[in-house]
Structure formats: C-alpha cells, structure tokens
Image (cartoon, rainbow, N blue to C red):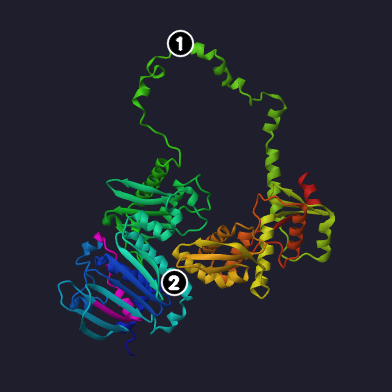
Amino acid sequence: MADRIVLLPDNIANQIAAGEVIQRPASAVKELLENAVDAGATEIKLFLNDAGKALIQVVDNGAGMSETDARMCFERHATSKIRNIDDLFHIRTMGFRGEALASIAAVAQVELRTRREQDEVGTCIEIENSLVKKQTPVAAPVGTSICMKNLFFNVPARRNFLKSNAAEMRHVIDEFIRVALAFPNIFFSLTSNGQQLFHLEAGSLKQRIVQLLGNNYSAKLVSVKENTDYLNVHGFIGKPETAKKTRGDQYFFVNNRFIRSAYLHHAIMQAYQDLISSDSFPAYVLFIDLDPTQVDVNVHPTKQEIKFEDEKIVYAFVQAAVKHSLAQFSITPTLDFELDASIQGLDAVQKPFTEREQSATRSSTIFQTFTEANQAHRIVGGEWATVKNESSGFVSLTKQLMQLEETAMPEPTQLTTHQQATLTTGSPTQVFNTFILLPTAEKFYLVHQQAAHERILYERFEAATLGRAVATQNSLFPVSVELAPQDVVLLAELLPDLQKLGYTIEPFGRSSFVIQGTPADLLAGNEKAALESILEHYKHFSSELKLPRREMLLRTVAWQQAIKPGTVLTEKEMNQLTEDLFACRQPNATPSGRPTYVEFSKNQLERMFL
C-alpha cells in the first residue's frame, strides 16, 4: 500500500497561511501600513480601488530595501526583527513573524518598488501566486511602494465571501484609524477611487484624535498620564457627556500596538461608574507602555489579542489612572489630603476640647437638634412600628406581581375584530408619562408607549421599503451635518434605504451632507440629532446583532422616531396609538422582541388581593 502523507507545495502552504493573516482587504492594509511604520517612514500614503478588492497600494518614504532584501521579504518567515529566541520576548516593532508579505503574495498580484538612500537605482519585483514573474532595476524614490491587485484572484471561493464595497471599506477605515492613532508623529493619507478621505498631518495625539474621531471631541477630552516603575499609562478619555450607546471610539494600545481587551475595558467602565449609564460606552484612546517581557503578543494571528504576565496589576493601574484624571478635572469628587498649612494654626485645631466645653456643647440647641430623639423623621412605637415589622406582606405581593408579569404576556397572535372593539369601552389614562392604561369590560391593558410606537413605525417602514414610500417634508432651511470619515462611508451605504423612509440627504463636500427633507411626522429642528442618532444606533445593532442591513436600518429608525418615556400624550393621541398598535400584524412585541403591552384580567387582580 502506498504512503499517504505528502508535503504540501509552497504555494498551497502559503495560501493556507494567508487564510489566517489575510482575511479581507483590511487585513492586508493593516500589515502593509505596519511594515511602512517599521521602515521608519515619516509619510505613508494608502491608495485603494473598490475598497481594496481591485487595488491596495502603500507608498512610504522609509529606509527602503536592497535588491536581495526585496526578493527575500516574500519568503515565509523571512524577518529582519528576530535573530534568536530571546528576541521574540523583546518585540517592540509591529511585524516580526515574516508572514504578511508571503501571505499577500500567495493570494494577490503584487508589485514592489523600493530603493535605499545609498543605492543609485531601485528594485522592481512582480510576484503572482507566490511565484516571481519579473525582477528588474528601476528608477524609484527612496522608500518603498507596494502594490497588490485583485485580492483572492486565485481563490474565487474566498473572494465570494467578501462583503459589499461599503462594508469592506468600513473595515479598511477601522484598520487605518488604529495605525494612524498609534503614530500621530507620522503623516498619513487615504485615497479611495481617486478621492482623498483622510489627510492627517503629523502632530500631537490630541490633534490626531480630533482629526479622526470628529471635531465634537476637541473640547471634551481629558488627559491621562500616570508613570510607574512597572508601566506607564497615557492618552485621552472623553468626558461623561461624550458616552455613546455603541462601542466605536474605544482604543487600547500596548507598546503602540492596537489590542482588544474586554478585561481592560471593564477597568475603564468601573472608573466611569455612576458617571454614565450602564449601557453607555465612554470614548478613550489609551496607551500602555511596559517591558515587552511582561507581555506576549504572539498568541493570535492578527496580534490583536495579547497576554499580560500579570493582568491584575495592569487592570488596577489603568482603572486608577482613569479615575485620577476624572477627579483632577473636577468630573468626579475627590478627597484632597494636602491641607493648607494655615488651617493647622486655627483655634479649633490647636486648642484642647475641655470637659466644660463639651458639656456646654451638649446643652446647646444645635447639638440637641441632631440627636436621635429630636430628629424630625424619628417614629417611636405605635402602629407604624407594627407595619414596619410586617414587611413580609409587601414581599409576597411583589412576588405575586412578578409571577403575574411572567404569565400575563399575550400570545403572539393578532387580536380579533371583537377584541379590538372591546378596547373602546373605557378612556385611556397615561401613567408615569410612560404607560397607557386601557380598561375594558373584563380586563385592562398596560401599554408601553415607546414599545408600541416602535412596532407601529416598524411595520409602516417595512411597507415603505416594499413600495409605499413615507411622505417627505422638505425643509425650508436645509440643515448641514459634518460627519467623521467612517460615518461618511456608512451614510453613503444607507442613503438609498433612508430615501424610502422619508429622508432626502445629499452629499456636500468631502465629509458633509445636507438634509433637504425628513419624514413628515419628524419634529422640525430635530433633523441633525435624528440623523446622528440613527447612525449611532445602527452601529450598535451591527455590533450586537448579525442581521441584514435593511432590517437593522428599519429597527434603528423605528427606535429613533418612537415617542420616548416622559412624553405627555393627549387622550386623542393615546387612542390613536392604541388603535394603530392593535391594527398591526404582530402587535404584542417590538421588532427586537420586547413586549408592547401586558394584559391583566379581572380574575388575576382578584387573586392578587386574595
């Protein structure tokens, strides 16, 4: 019987390795940008066509390569960073494993042009499917230009898994922002299909954050800087009012390498405790510098997950640094232990508190006012004490209410015409400006006004996408809105569907849009906030749920336009809302599955009162 195990050919082995390192155009962008940084470049330019599917080109003015190095850099595990095993534990550069260029050459057509300062001519190499097609001397500026075309041209199955250009472009911009934030002292630019999206001059970290995350952060950043023998933490955090419902503007860098860490994110959330709601996320760009021997960056193919020697110490330092910064800028209360020296000289501090002075103080009216017997809220004996000791009755009632809520959820079926008719037997009443109490002959409904409106709007918008467009109200004074570059790409992707939902939005320059019209029932003067809220909530959905784009947008716009808790409704508005709700295809739940109403029958109420 013949032997069954054979060695894979190099080009197939490279393609398998590429599956780990190069998952989409954004992966190649990350590797090429990091190589340019490692080359000591002060200017790095990124050019894309079709979101990187057709072309990714990175041009830098770094050190360049010799003819031999230019050929060797495409071999697997060829690296200039490691000579022995100890070097692996002192890594401070971005790339070091020598897999990136070999992986890119295995799944794309690559052209490399490079020249060192001491060389008169440069080198041009063309590689396809891991095979060198051409190597020639060429005139070239100092630095390196690497051009990769037709990603996954030889792996059509992988190419079919790529998303739309807009979706892939968002991933590319995410990677670009991470590298650009880590190195504010380097000029970066990004040009897509001939249009420049980013032009980032070298400057301070704060300038780079504002350039990338938006001008609304310019006056809302708090500096963080804590140095210790073990590690240094520096960067910026957003003031509590910048917190959003989505995770987007959170960046951790360890030794200038972007990382994901739910553990360290928790440390920052704890520092913001009581300053923001539990479902909000603060903005931060934080850099942790520590000895490379205390961290292992080689635990994940993309190097975005790392391991610390002692996670708890890093957690404690990060949390303390953020808390200290929030306190320093009078955002959280803090105790000042450095007392003014003049306070120590006051009589109240220096002189002893004698027995005579103590008895005089005790007999004063101020002292007696604060003794327990004289406090206004004190209740001694009597029936109140009895009630206090019989609190178990309230506990059992609470349990019954909880059990009732669990059993009172209506079945997910549409109400019959007879059931709808019974709703008109009583007038609706608003409770806590959040719920609508709707009595009938044998039961009553408790309707959540926002949840009910969400369901109504969702079904209306769903119909709009299938043909019946929502009425648009043109603005007398169109509103312009300035967006961060990543939001520009997102909005461009959503514009056709937003048009069907009643929005008329037109591009106005590189990162600006003009809102010409909005849905007819949207409150005038609220156009800009509404659009920003839609984009923010859409990103929240896309990070939490894997749903089709249109479904996420319908849910987002329904949530954004629904009347919020705290809104006072007239009797006419309450009648209209409940009538529209029970006319819905599925009236009992919001698009995301939350109940819109709870039903209480007369028998259930009688059981509650024993």
Instruction: State which tag comes first along the sequence, 2 or 1.
Output: 2
- Reading the image, the residue beneath label 2 is 169
Q: Which residue is found at the position 43% from the left and 50% from the top?
A: 219
Report the amino acid beneath label 1. Glu
240 and 481: which is toward the camera: 481
Q: Specify whether residue 92 is painted magenta.
A: yes
- Reading the image, the residue beneath label 1 is 355
Q: Is residue 166 above or below residue 378?
A: below
**Looking at the picture, how far across and down is residue 270, in whole percent?**
46, 47
**Looking at the picture, how far across and down is residue 430, in whole percent?**
73, 49
377 and 145: which is toward the camera: 145
| Residue 422 visible in the snapshot | yes
Quadrant for the N terminus, please.
Answer: bottom left
77 and 476: which is toward the camera: 476
The answer to whether 487 appears left or right of 311 in the picture is: right
The answer to whether 547 appears left or right of 103 in the picture is: right
User: Is the Cβ of the residue at disc 2 closer than 8 Å to that at disc 1?
Assistant: no
Quarter of image, res 350: top left
Report the amino acid beneath label 2. Met
**Looking at the picture, how far across and down is residue 347, in whole percent?**
40, 16
Q: Residue furthest front?
A: 476
Quarter of image, res 335: top left
Q: Which residues are magenta?
A: 89-113
Q: Residue furthest bottom?
A: 1
Q: Which residue is found at the position 28% from the left and 48% from the top?
A: 230
Q: Is residue 84 above or below residue 216?
A: below
Quadrant for the C terminus, please.
Answer: top right
What element does badge 1 sit on?
A: helix
